[in-house]
């Protein structure tokens, strides 16, 4: 029997030239990969605007992300591209600014372990099921749009205690799609030193998209910020993440976040908590549609734990097989396929001299599919996360690792298992015959033609 592999962009046999990248492979970095990319230990790519080094073995990953993380700060190009949306947020800042922001944000994410946050997720999941039932039994549709809306709704509820208005939600989702596409093109053009005059229109478009998203968030945050800081209201009726951000104070100066700082951090949480989870959920549903046998086994676990379809936080924690499916999906389709850093000083990596200022790109996509560390690496096999032998350290990091590991990783895992359990309980999922996702690695790993499925209602 022939193996059915989840789709991934077929790599070219030989390395693609920089000119070919600019004119024919410019949609995303995944288009540039060639066969040796998936077995190499250390890559080097010379671009007109920079030299990129791609460490791809555990010891080097450990250096860049963990043991010497301070010597490999976030790439300033990333900050430049994301600034219209995120401002000065923890996602792109470095040094003392990043450390201060992280310390102020940490208490906000202590609450992801609290029952009431799960209840907010559960309410959003219940509303998702109601929307999906309207689409069920009506042929094939793009479920990626629903996942994008649902994860945005969860972020709005847990951070801002506000349900996402359907009309406003679609506007925000569209703005973010435009932002992703434009920022990827701008980043590529900067690496090729394309004169800024040729990207004037693109810059205008993506700045406009950033303003749409930030203004939507600002409309909710500003009234609460003013009430809180004018003493009229101490946010006592709210137990969301925004409430903890309003109360947070710098341990050294005693100063709270300014309004702009809070807006920047919430915009970051929106990007990290909505877009990445939407990507991961869509890929997991693609895989479940591709493999009905895994779908059925996961459904059996869900029904054995919660036969009435009413989920508690303890139920979600017990769903080990559903969790393994999601983890394996994250391995094959990490939400952030490339993590851009810069070398703060001259250093050696294997036999290569990495000069100060060089770009160092750690790729979960490549490391997760490296044949040196994974058996049959392009095949979906959730049992990898249930076997007795542990996965080799520094070969799996969908949420990053080290001091800059994703602050909301536990939040995302809890959310994903809940959404998957809800869908599996209520629906049979079928992938559209002949459907092949058009994969692009931009800010996140997405299918440009969506994920085409049919849902058949069970309950």
Image (tube, helix red, strand yellow):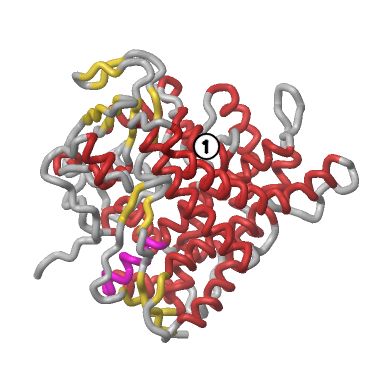
Q: Nearer the viewer, residue 321 or 42?
A: 42
Image x and y of residue 146, in percent:
49, 68
- In the image, residue 131 above or below residue 62: below
What residue occupies the far right of the structure in this picture? 232
Question: Count of labels shown?
Answer: 1
Around disc 1, counting alpha carbons within 10 Å, would you say few (fewer than 14), some (14 to 19), or many (20 or more)?
Answer: many
Q: Quick check: is 291 in the magenta stretch?
A: yes
Q: Which residues are magenta?
A: 282-293
Give the image quarter of residue 158: bottom right
- In the image, residue 159 above or below residue 312: above
Residue assigned mark 1: 91
Q: Residue at x 41, y 18 (%)?
A: 344
What residue occupies the far front of the structure in this picture? 197
- In the image, residue 122 above or below residue 117: below
Image x and y of residue 282, in percent:
40, 62
Q: Nearer the viewer, residue 42 or 392?
A: 42
Can the viewer see residue 400 in this picture?
yes
């Amino acid at each position: 029997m022939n193996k059915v592999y989840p789709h991934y962009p077929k790599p070219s046999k030989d390395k693609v030239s920089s000119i070919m990248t600019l004119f024919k492979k410019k949609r995303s970095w995944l288009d540039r990969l060639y066969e040796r990319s998936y077995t190499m230990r250390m890559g080097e790519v010379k671009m007109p605007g920079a030299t990129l080094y791609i460490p791809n073995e555990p010891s080097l990953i450990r250096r860049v992300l963990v043991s010497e993380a301070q010597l490999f700060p976030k790439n300033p190009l990333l900050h430049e591209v994301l600034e219209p949306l995120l401002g000065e947020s923890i996602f792109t800042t470095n040094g003392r600014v990043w450390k201060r922001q992280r310390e102020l944000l940490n208490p906000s994410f202590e609450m992801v372990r609290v029952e009431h946050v799960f209840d907010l997720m559960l309410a959003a999941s219940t509303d998702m099921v109601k929307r999906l039932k309207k689409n069920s039994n009506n042929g094939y549709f793009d479920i990626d749009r629903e996942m994008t809306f649902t994860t945005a709704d969860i972020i709005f509820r847990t951070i801002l205690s506000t349900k996402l208005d359907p009309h406003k939600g679609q506007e925000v989702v569209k703005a973010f799609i435009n932002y992703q596409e434009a920022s990827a093109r701008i980043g590529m053009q900067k690496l090729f030193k394309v004169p800024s005059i040729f990207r004037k229109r693109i810059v205008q478009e993506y700045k406009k998209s950033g303003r749409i998203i930030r203004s939507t968030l600002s409309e909710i945050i500003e009234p609460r910020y003013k009430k809180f800081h004018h003493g009229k209201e101490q946010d006592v009726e709210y137990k969301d993440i925004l409430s903890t951000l309003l109360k947070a104070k710098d341990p050294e100066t005693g100063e709270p976040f300014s309004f702009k700082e809070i807006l920047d951090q919430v915009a970051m949480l929106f990007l990290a908590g909505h877009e990445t989870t939407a990507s991961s959920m869509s890929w997991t549903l693609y895989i479940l549609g591709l493999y009905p046998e895994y779908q059925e086994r996961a459904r059996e676990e869900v029904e054995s734990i919660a036969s009435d379809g009413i989920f508690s936080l303890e139920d979600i924690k017990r769903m080990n097989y559903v969790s393994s499916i999601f983890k394996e999906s994250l391995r094959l389709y990490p939400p952030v396929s490339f993590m851009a850093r810069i070398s703060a000083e001259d250093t050696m990596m294997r036999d290569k001299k990495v000069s100060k200022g060089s770009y160092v790109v750690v790729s979960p996509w490549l490391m997760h599919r490296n044949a040196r560390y994974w058996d049959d690496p392009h095949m979906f096999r959730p049992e990898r996360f249930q076997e007795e032998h542990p996965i080799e350290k520094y070969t799996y990091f969908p949420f990053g690792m080290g001091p800059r590991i994703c602050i909301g990783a536990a939040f995302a895992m809890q959310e994903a298992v809940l959404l998957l359990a809800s869908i599996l309980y209520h629906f049979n999922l079928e992938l559209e015959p002949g459907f092949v996702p058009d994969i692009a690695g931009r800010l996140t790993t997405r299918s440009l033609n969506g994920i085409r499925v049919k849902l058949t209602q069970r309950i």
